[in-house]
Amino acid sequence: VVSTPITYCKGDVAIPLTATGTSLLWYADSVLGSGSSTAPTPSTAAADTLSYYVSQTISGCVSPRAKIDVIIKNTSVHNESTAVCLADLPYIWNGLTFNSAGSKTAHFTNAVGCDSAATMTLTVKSPTTSTNTHSVCITNLPYIWNGLTFNAAGSQTAHFTNAAGCDSAATMTLTVKSPTSSTNTHSVCVTNLPYIWNGLTFNTAGTQTAHLTNSAGCDSAATLILTVNPV
């Protein structure tokens, strides 16, 4: 008595075939060849249908050979790859958790009931950063840079998307330069009028302010108070 078919998945560990009877002999062909008393062990190295034959001997008579089919069902493999930004970690895929770049395999059951190995290879893309510095005069406030508004000196960071599709953090450190002022006094005789000073013209006594540029590149307000002495 035989049980057929016998099924395995590719790569399974097979055991020797069995049958019920007396003085069993095993064959590789239905009619040709001599039998072996050692039961064969099927190879599961490849998906296939293998046929074996067995007979029994009763009272010196050999029975017809009974066929046993062994079906080796195929496993399946699926490979996939993807790339994520560092900020997207941990990355979950088919129940697997990636905390860094690498490969992991999830095991399922395919349509024929055998192993389905799905492998994910994950690449992690990096963010980028840049640092910039700039100086402005206080009269140039508020200062606008990459959508950020500076009302005073300090640092702010704008976030963009880099070439890899991840975060690009651009930081600006702003320095605010101050204006300067000075006050001067001078006396002239009336006969020295008009009096010219830093491009200003005094026709009488009084106060005027000239606006120049200081060493920081900002406004320098220079004020002259002129006194006119009579002759």
Image (tube, grey):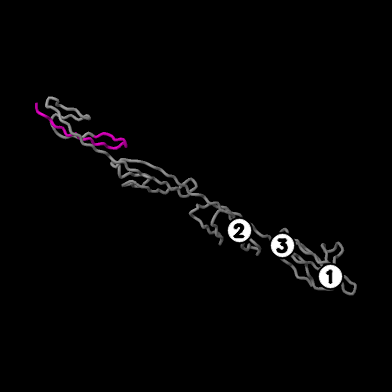
How far is mark 1 from mark 2, CA to CA? 44 Å
Question: Is label 1 in a helix, a strand or a loop?
Answer: loop
Q: Which amino acid lies under the numbered mark 1 shown in the image of this protein?
A: Leu
Residue 117's image quarter? bottom right
Q: Which mark is residue 105?
A: 2
How far is mark 1 from mark 3, CA to CA? 24 Å
Magenta stretch in the rendered image: 211-231
The residue that disc 1 covers is 24
Dot 1 or dot 3, earlier in sequence: 1
Q: Which amino acid lies under the numbered mark 3 shown in the image of this protein?
A: Ile
How far is mark 2 from mark 3, CA to CA? 23 Å
The answer to the question of whether label 2 and label 3 lie on touching residues, with beta carbons closer than 8 A, is no
How crowded is the residue under tag 3: few (<14 C-alpha within 10 Å), some, or many (20+)? many
Dot 1 or dot 2, earlier in sequence: 1
> Is residue 38 positioned above or below 197 on the image?
below
The residue that disc 3 covers is 72
Closest to the observer: 30 or 176? 176
Q: Residue at x 81, y 68 (%)?
A: 66
Q: Which mark is in front, 1 or 2? A: 2
In x, y percent, where is residue 119?
60, 56
In x, y percent, where is residue 136?
33, 41
How crowded is the residue under tag 2: few (<14 C-alpha within 10 Å), some, or many (20+)? some
Question: Is label 3 in a helix, a strand or a loop?
Answer: strand
Could you tell me which quadrant the C terminus lies in?
top left
The answer to the question of whether label 1 and label 3 lie on touching residues, with beta carbons closer than 8 A, is no
Q: Is residue 65 left or right of residue 9?
A: right
In x, y percent, where is residue 152?
31, 46
Q: Which mark is in front, 2 or 3? A: 2
